[in-house]
Amino acid sequence: MTGLFTPNPTDPRVIRTRQLILDAFVENLNKMDFNAITISDITKKATINRATFYAHFPDKYALLDALFSGTFLDYIIKRVDADAMLTKETIEQLIISLCDYHESTNRCVKKYDSVAPINEKNIKIQLEKFILQLLSRESEKTDSNKLELTATMLCWSLYGITFQWNIGGRSESPIDLSKRVLPMIFNGISWLNTTAKE
């Protein structure tokens, strides 16, 4: 269900209402599991009616996307130049960026475990596109299917390693984690450079 009108995103009242909805949502996420949160919980906390909510968001999943959209890439771009090539240093910075993102999101949302699986899909899509962009610059002669497969493999590896680090209690620093896993990851993709030169 969507509203009858589309709010003007530059209108200060729309911006304020959107922020009220997001704040109410975060407040609920800090107390409840995502799956248990209802639109009524959000509207009550935001002191708005359901029609106002639906004028801004079609459902709580869109609200979750709005909460996390863009933030992940912000973490990546802080450390990795979008015009960079895929090197050991770039992979190290990707690992550290992912750790920073997990840690920050954990601090913002206490019930992060309930939203992590939903947010994971969005992160992987963005990360895979970013890695593919880096790979394409370096290996123009490599078959596009190999590049896509490598980007997927690297994306899932990096996400999985950093996610496990996060839920495992973060017993080592992001830099130590990257130094430990970097040789394994980089050796796994070194075949791409070999095949590109053949």
Image (tube, helix red, strand yellow):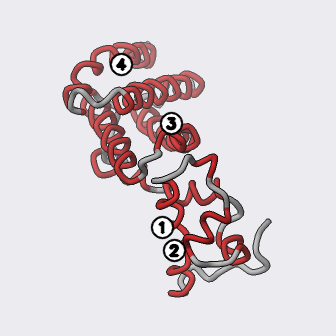
Q: Which residue is mark 4?
A: 185
Q: Nearer the viewer, mark 3 or mark 2?
A: 2
Marks 3/4: CA–CA distance: 15 Å
Q: Residues within 10 Å of mark 2 (few under 14, many from 20)?
A: some
Marks 3/2: CA–CA distance: 32 Å
Q: Secondary structure at mark 3?
A: helix
Q: Residues within 10 Å of mark 1 (few under 14, many from 20)?
A: some
First reached walking from the N terminus: tag 1 or tag 3? 1
Q: Which residue is mark 3?
A: 128
> Looking at the picture, which amino acid does disc 3 mark?
Glu
Q: Nearer the viewer, mark 1 or mark 3?
A: 1
Relative to 100, does residue 150 appear above or below in the rendering?
above
Disc assigned to residue 23: 1
Relative to 107, does residue 47 appear above or below in the rendering?
below
First reached walking from the N terminus: tag 1 or tag 4? 1
Residue 151 lies, in percent from the top left, at: 49, 29
Q: Secondary structure at mark 1?
A: helix
First reached walking from the N terminus: tag 2 or tag 4? 2
Disc assigned to residue 33: none
Relative to 35, does residue 176 appear above or below in the rendering?
above
Marks 2/1: CA–CA distance: 5 Å
Residue 38 lies, in percent from the top left, at: 66, 58
- When asked about the image quadrant of residue 134, the answer is top left
